[in-house]
Amino acid sequence: MGLPAAQVLLPRFWVALALGLPVLVLAMGGMVAPALFHRLDPRLSGWLQFALTTPVFFWSGAPFIRRWWVSLRDRDTNMFTLVVTGTGAAYFYSTAALAFGGRFPPALADRTECLSISRPPRSSRPLC
């Protein structure tokens, strides 16, 4: 069982593209043009990104999520399992960080609010 035909996937692609480009601009715009984005409240930007990303994940990704569920149910892991598990983990972690960011332990963030990731013992600098 594969994915639906292009007539089902193509409209989902265009909606995902239309909603995803503003998310790209909101997320990366501060690095490209800091003067334009320094006035935008980061919390507002986060909620806008959440509002734009949710239909992309759940509606545009619905055929992939269905195949993910079938692969888990049948215990036949495949690329759908990998892709939806990874994107789902990122989506739900980001949602939790947005909604409950103040409740996360301070050890998870450094002075730049980047998630600290373990490095080899020689260096304890976070990856950003």
Image: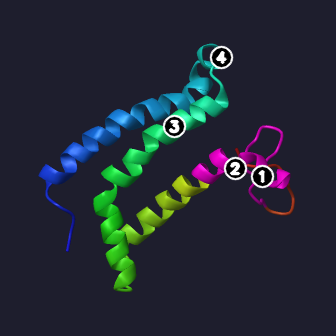
Which residue carries the number 2 mark?
100
Residue pictured at 72% horizontal, 50% vertical? 115
Span highlighted in magenta in the image? 94-119
Disc 1 marks a residue whose amino acid type is: Arg
Query: Visible in this render: residue 26?
Result: yes
Q: How many labels does the image show?
A: 4
Question: Crowding near pointer 1: few (<14 within 10 Å), some, many (20+)?
Answer: few
Is disc 3 placed on a helix, strand or loop? helix
Residue pictured at 60% horizontal, 30% vertical? 44
Tell me, yes or no, whether the highlighted magenta stretch contains residue 59. Answer: no
Which residue carries the number 4 mark?
39
Tell me, yes or no, whether the highlighted magenta stretch contains residue 117. Answer: yes
Q: Nearer the viewer, residue 58 or 14?
A: 58
Question: Crowding near pointer 3: few (<14 within 10 Å), some, many (20+)?
Answer: some
| CA distance for labels 3 and 2 | 16 Å
Is residue 38 found left or right of 1 in the rendered image?
right
Above or below residue 38? Residue 43 is below
Is disc 1 placed on a helix, strand or loop? helix
Disc 2 marks a residue whose amino acid type is: Phe
Disc 3 marks a residue whose amino acid type is: Gln
Residue pictured at 78% horizontal, 53% vertical? 108
Question: Crowding near pointer 2: few (<14 within 10 Å), some, many (20+)?
Answer: few
Above or below residue 8? Residue 114 is above
Number of the label disc, if any, that sits on residue 103: 1
Q: Is the C-beta separation of discs 1 and 4 under 8 Å?
A: no
Q: Measured from the top left, where is residue 126 in percent x and y?
A: 78, 49
Q: Measured from the top left, where is residue 49 in percent x and y?
A: 51, 37
Is residue 76 found left or right of 38 in the rendered image?
left
Disc 4 marks a residue whose amino acid type is: Arg
Which residue carries the number 3 mark?
49
Name the N-terminal-most of marks 3 and 4: 4
| CA distance for labels 1 and 4 | 25 Å
